[in-house]
Image (spheres, rainbow, N blue to C red):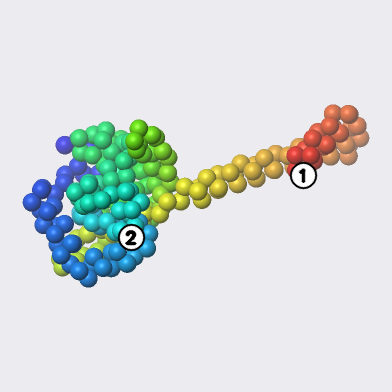
Amino acid sequence: MKTYFAPAERADKMNLEKQIAFINDNPIFTSILDSMGGLLAVLNEHRQVLAINQSLLKHLNIHNSEEFSGLRPGELLDCVYSALEEGGCGTSKYCSSCGAAIAIVSSLTEDKSKEKICALRREKDGQIEDRALLVRCTPFVLYGKRLLLLFLQDISEQEQRAALETIFFHDIANMLSGLLGAAELMDFGTNKPELSTIIRQNTVRLI
């Protein structure tokens, strides 16, 4: 199966069902899963979802496990690129620059925790929506089975605020440069009316 980034192979139906049952039949693990705050999922080594906590269930408005079992994160989150290739999430040409895909693959490959920001473009009910997600991946072994904890945090508002602050400070810098330039010309004895206009306009914008 063709892929541009992550392996396309998935666990077969029988093994997937065993993996899901293994998680669900472990009361200690499931209680820990649901007690943890934030959006959390458990993936197998093929990047398929085996379980998600109550917070993520509510966030995605999912009512039963059949709606998510075996999906990959992009498919779970309705990423517009997750269905471009037969292999699904992680296999399209766009996935090589996806923060979530990079974090998941590198975490599994290097067997260490990884954190990236994912710029998610999702389609839900015919509407396109852009979200920024902080993605943390932590690999672990449970009774000899290699699994991955996937933590998701929606940071869209923080990213938008940071972008607005960047634009704001850029504008301030431009206005100050204009004021300094006009002031320097006046210091050199250039006394043109337009210099006074520049200073006045930039001062008004700064107030």
Q: Position of residue 109 (x, y in %)?
A: 25, 54
Q: Is residue 41 above or below residue 98?
A: below
Q: Is residue 169 visible?
A: yes
Measuring 33% from the left and 60% from the top, which residue is drawn there? 113
Judged left or right of residue 134, residue 9 is: left
Label 2, secondary structure: give it: loop
Is 146 on the left-hand or right-hand side of 202? left
Residue at the image point whose x is 40% and y is 54% from the top: 153
Q: Give the position of the C terminus as an image quadrant.
A: top right
Camera-side residue: 13 or 106? Answer: 13
Question: Residue at label 2?
Answer: 113
The residue at 21%/44% (across/down) is 7
- Determine the image quadrant of residue 119: top left
Q: Residue furthest left?
A: 14
**Residue 24 location, x and y as percent?**
18, 62
Q: Residue at x 84, y 28 (%)?
A: 194
Q: Kindly state the secondary structure of the residue where label 1 is placed.
A: loop
What is the tally of numbered marks visible in this picture? 2
Relative height, residue 62 to residue 123 (above, below) = below
Whether residue 101 appears in this view of the structure is: no
Q: Position of residue 65 (x, y in %)?
A: 21, 52
Could you classify mark 1 by the number of other residues whose Cα lies within 10 Å: few (under 14), some (14-19), or many (20 or more)?
A: few
Quadrant location of the N terminus in the rendered image: top left
Residue 5 is drawn in which quadrant? top left
Query: Mark 2 is on which residue type?
Result: Ser
Name the foreground residue: 130 vs 34: 34
- Which label sits in the foreground, 1 or 2? 1
- Res. 164 image quadrant: top right
Q: Which mark is residue 207?
A: 1
Residue 177 position within the rendered picture, expressed as x and y whole percent measured from the top left = 74, 40
